[in-house]
């Protein structure tokens, strides 16, 4: 059978802005039913590349070829609307057709856009992005191009979108920094790095493994080139009289060797570990605080005593009151009743969603050094403003760029550096991961893991939360707050094991002082004979599914299977993963029994 034409084929595409080359002669394709995640550092051209592919921007050279007759849907990072349109009118192409109007309302409701007659000008930026996402999904294109589809979605919306995109053999190319989303939705990763692209035929976990192998191989090659370069340099210096025709080939080889030896791999640096933190035993006590906006209750007689060195995550749907809670803690919003009693030694560092305010004519290094010249790490060690920026992947060249040249993600990264440069010992981070590239997220995760103070994080990034926090406050709405001792994945596992009625009913979520708590525990239930048999069978089925998953992923990554086989395997893989998740959860439930 002849291979089908890819949905889109990029051939030797180059794009520059002035002297800055974003990518040079890059080529890759997206096949039917393939789900591709595009990964790159901030400022290296991800959004520009999607804009070129979607036809909204031109390239300097090369070509973008689409299969004839396919319909393309494009979600921009910053969508544009006629602000006089209603929400429903903004969902173009429905043309009053009842089926499309119904579909539009269903998807908008899933994305918590409930007032279809509301004017677009009355919506927040996040709500407008959700309307734009609904817009793209409603049209049911053959090929979806999505730029940061999970930004401004809460956890329930993200998990709904994961399922939606994973079903039905959809074809898509997307940029996202949500690593769980990449892992569960994409079957191919394309990395844009050093002006070229690398393709990995597998999910995010496979990409991490193979990228590490590529980096190690390149580093070894650079080391070999450096060794040869030193020897060749000695020869070139010793033998000026020998540079006749016979040595010309060696001179040419020397120039190529010099280029390779000077190649740089800008990878992770050493982890920053600060020991210069003094924070008293008293952090803060939330003393029976209540807060409401009209009929909407945020907190109701909520008590919590924050522990020293605690790393807490706050999760919940949009509008449940997460940001309001931390603004009350910081004294920016007053409670209706109750109080926050904050320790005298606490020094907050606050990263807010509204904090991106810079002088565009300043240089990056000046923005940070105007706050402080250095951070005291303790033990006689200091970290300069330039070193902090370099740790968060601002190269020395980028540090002397003007702020107006930075991408959206780079601006948020710079804002994060300004917060850290103030040397706080209690970090309060409200959605810090939005628009940050994966490499920066990894740096921030390590920084927070090693941070010797207190941390509160509000985030919808499940992977990030799992890596950093050890405790959750779950805002369920209407003042219902669940205090959970664990990370996000552990919380989801706990939820899945609860009886449905138990998880639906509202429960008081105040954490009483320790002296008021009573430990309650009952005898553990024993497995029945039937449950023992089920437990043994599950162990075998889980092992078989894990083997099948590995075989499929190895085959998809091996590059030896046909397009038809790729299609079938791509359809089977999410089914295997879903079955595996279900059986592992049931196994976990049974393992709790004696």
Image (spheres, rainbow, N blue to C red):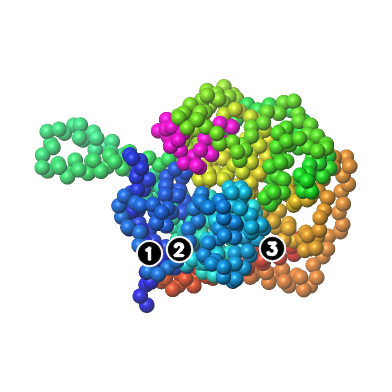
Closer to the N terminus: mark 1 or mark 3? 1
> Which residue does the numbered mark 2 point to in the structure image?
72
Quadrant, the C terminus = bottom right
Instruction: Tell me if residue 397 is in the magenta stretch.
Output: yes
Disc 1 from disc 3: Cα separation: 43 Å
> Which residue does the numbered mark 3 point to in the structure image?
585
The residue at 47%/71% (across/down) is: 567
Residue 267 is situated, as x and y percent measured from the top left of the image, at 45, 41
Pair 3/2: label in front = 2
The residue at 53%/50% (across/down) is: 177
Pair 1/3: label in front = 1
Q: Nearer the viewer, residue 494 or 319?
A: 319
**Crowd rating for badge 3 (residues with CA inside 10 Å; few <14, some 14–19, many 20+):** some
Instruction: Tell me if residue 563 is in the magenta stretch.
Output: no
Element under disc 3 = helix
Residue 286 appears in which quarter of the rendering? top right
Q: Is residue 21 above or below residue 82?
A: above
């Amino acid at each position: 059978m002849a291979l089908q034409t890819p949905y889109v084929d990029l051939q030797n595409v180059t794009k520059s802005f002035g002297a800055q080359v974003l990518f040079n002669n890059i080529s890759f394709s997206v096949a039917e039913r393939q789900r591709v995640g595009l990964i790159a550092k901030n400022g290296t051209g991800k959004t520009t590349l999607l804009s070129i592919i979607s036809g909204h921007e031109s390239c300097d050279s090369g070509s973008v070829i689409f299969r004839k007759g396919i319909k393309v849907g494009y979600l921009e990072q910053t969508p544009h609307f006629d602000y006089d349109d209603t929400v429903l009118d903004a969902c173009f192409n429905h043309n009053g057709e009842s089926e499309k109007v119904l579909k539009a309302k269903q998807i908008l409701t899933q994305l918590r856009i409930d007032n279809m007659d509301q004017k677009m000008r009355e919506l927040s930026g996040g709500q407008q992005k959700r309307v734009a996402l609904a817009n793209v999904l409603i049209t049911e294109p053959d090929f979806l191009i999505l730029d940061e589809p999970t930004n401004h979605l809460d956890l329930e919306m993200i998990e709904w979108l994961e399922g939606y995109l994973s079903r039905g053999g959809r074809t898509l190319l997307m940029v996202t920094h949500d690593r769980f989303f990449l892992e569960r939705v994409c079957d191919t990763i394309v990395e844009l790095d050093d002006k070229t692209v690398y393709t990995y035929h597998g999910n995010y976990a496979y990409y991490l493994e193979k990228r590490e192998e590529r980096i190690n191989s390149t580093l070894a090659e650079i080391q070999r080139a450096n060794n040869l370069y030193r020897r060749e340099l000695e020869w070139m210096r010793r033998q000026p009289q020998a540079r006749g025709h016979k040595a010309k080939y060696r001179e040419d080889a020397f120039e190529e060797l010099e280029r390779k030896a000077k190649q740089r791999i800008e990878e992770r640096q050493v982890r920053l570990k600060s020991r210069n933190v003094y924070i008293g035993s008293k952090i803060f006590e939330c003393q029976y605080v209540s807060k409401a906006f009209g009929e909407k209750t945020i907190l109701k007689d909520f008590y919590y005593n924050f522990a020293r060195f605690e790393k807490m995550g706050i999760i919940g749907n949009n509008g449940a009151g997460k940001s309001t809670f931390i603004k009350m803690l910081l004294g920016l919003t007053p409670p209706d009743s109750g109080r926050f009693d904050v320790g005298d030694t606490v020094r907050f560092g606050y990263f807010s969603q509204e904090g991106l305010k810079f002088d565009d004519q300043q240089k990056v290094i000046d923005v940070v050094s105007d706050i402080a010249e250095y951070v005291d790490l303790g033990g006689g060690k200091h970290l300069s403003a330039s070193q902090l920026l370099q740790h968060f992947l601002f190269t020395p060249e980028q540090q002397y760029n003007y702020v107006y040249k930075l991408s959206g993600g780079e601006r948020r990264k710079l804002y994060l550096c300004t917060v850290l440069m103030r040397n706080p010992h209690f970090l309060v981070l409200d959605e810090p991961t939005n628009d940050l590239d994966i490499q920066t997220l990894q740096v921030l995760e390590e920084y927070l893991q090693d941070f010797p103070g207190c941390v509160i994080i509000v985030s919808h990034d499940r992977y990030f939360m799992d890596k950093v926090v050890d405790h959750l406050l779950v805002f369920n709405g209407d003042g219902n707050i669940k205090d959970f001792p664990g990370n996000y994945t552990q919380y989801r596992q706990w939820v899945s094991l609860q009886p449905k009625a138990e998880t639906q009913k509202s429960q008081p979520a105040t954490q009483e002082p320790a002296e008021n708590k009573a430990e309650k525990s009952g005898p553990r239930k024993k497995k029945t004979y039937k449950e023992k048999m089920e437990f043994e069978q599950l162990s075998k089925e889980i092992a078989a599914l894990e083997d099948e998953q590995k075989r499929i992923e190895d085959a998809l990554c091996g590059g030896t299977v046909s397009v038809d086989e790729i299609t079938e395997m791509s359809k089977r893989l999410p089914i295997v993963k879903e079955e595996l998740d279900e059986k592992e959860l049931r196994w976990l439930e049974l393992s709790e029994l004696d």
